[in-house]
Amino acid sequence: MIQNILDVIRERRSVRTFDGTALKEDARKILRFAEGVENPYDLPISWKLLDAGKEGLTSPVIVGATAFIAGKMRRVPHAEEAFGYTFEKIVLYAQSLGVGTTWIAGTMNRDAFEKALSVEEGEVMPCVSPLGYPAKKMSLRETLMRKGVKADVRLDFGKLFFDGAFDAPLTEKDAGDLTAALEAVRLAPSAVNRQPWRVVVAGNDVHFYEKHNRGFVSDDGWDIQKIDMGIALCHFELSAKACGLAVSFSISDPKIPTADDTEYVGTFRAV
Ligand SMILES: Cc1cc2nc3c(=O)[nH]c(=O)nc-3n(C[C@H](O)[C@H](O)[C@H](O)COP(=O)(O)O)c2cc1C
């Protein structure tokens, strides 16, 4: 599907200012692609292209977008990770076509989106994204937003990735075959750019953890940072495969000692 996934991951950024042209064939391609994406949790997600004008869909941070893509699913355990993994594959596919996106969980008229998607009791619409061609110049609001969350900056490799245990930072050199895939995780987008992913490499096992920030878990248990974790899993898997590694996913906590705010999510075995 994607020729050079590492380049696509490096080139992607949130696009909040669009040139206003309609998408036509690219929109249909993206929807067809979305409908074929599976996730490691085997949870079904249904996708819809939405016409911003007809459905009255707006986001205070987005300028010039005529279309959105949104997905809904049953609200079950691991829905967040499954959604994050799947939607990021769609985002990267859009990027490979030259179509800009922005993950949006909060800044939208959510009621109108949920109505357009016919979200029912027991279902959830975690995020939406505009689809469009990036404008030549960012709006002032977009520029300020990027500065506000330091959108162009990511945590250092050694702060995110560990060698066997959380007290042993992993260097890019020691990561060996996994360096590129871990770099792809490092570059991933996350809510408010908080980058909650932490990874412990133990032999061929690559254990993913969520380092919780305050304020991302709602009273009913929905955890937006688990969406970020799904994005990290997606970047790792796509990039490891592109580097010629065979990867398989499982959830089997290795019981490595962690801080109280750090939660095991899942493991890729990469060989
Ligand atoms: C789960 C999730 C939710 C997000 N929600 C919003 C949002 O509501 N509004 C917004 O403008 N950006 C949102 N973002 C985009 C992030 O702010 C952005 O990805 C991050 O700052 C990194 O910038 P980049 O995507 O340009 O690399 C969200 C991102 C993720 C992954």
Image (cartoon, grey):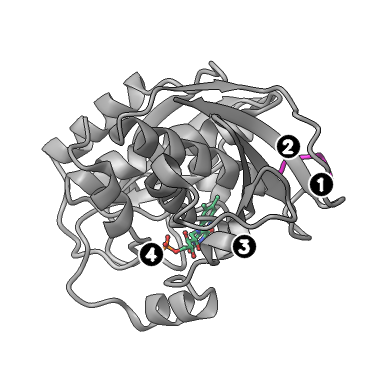
Mark 4 vs 2, N-terminal side: 4
Please state the extent of the stretch shown in magenta in the rendering: 219-223
Marks 4 and 2 close (CB-CB < 8 Å): no
Mark 2 vs 3, N-terminal side: 3
Front in this rendered view, residue 119 or 129: 129
**x and y, in percent, of residue 103 in the image:** 45, 52
Local crowd size for mark 3, using a 10 Å CA cut-off: few (<14), some (14–19), many (≥20): some
Q: Amino acid at mark 4?
A: Ile
Q: Which residue is mark 2?
A: 264
Q: CA distance from mark 4 to mark 1?
A: 39 Å
Local crowd size for mark 2, using a 10 Å CA cut-off: few (<14), some (14–19), many (≥20): some
**x and y, in percent, of residue 133 in the image:** 19, 57
Q: Which residue is mark 1?
A: 258
Element assignment for label 1: loop
Q: Is mark 4 within 8 Å of ligand 1?
A: yes
Q: CA distance from mark 2 to mark 3?
A: 17 Å
Residue at 55% x, 18% y: name it. Answer: 43
Element assignment for label 4: loop
**x and y, in percent, of residue 86 in the image:** 44, 32
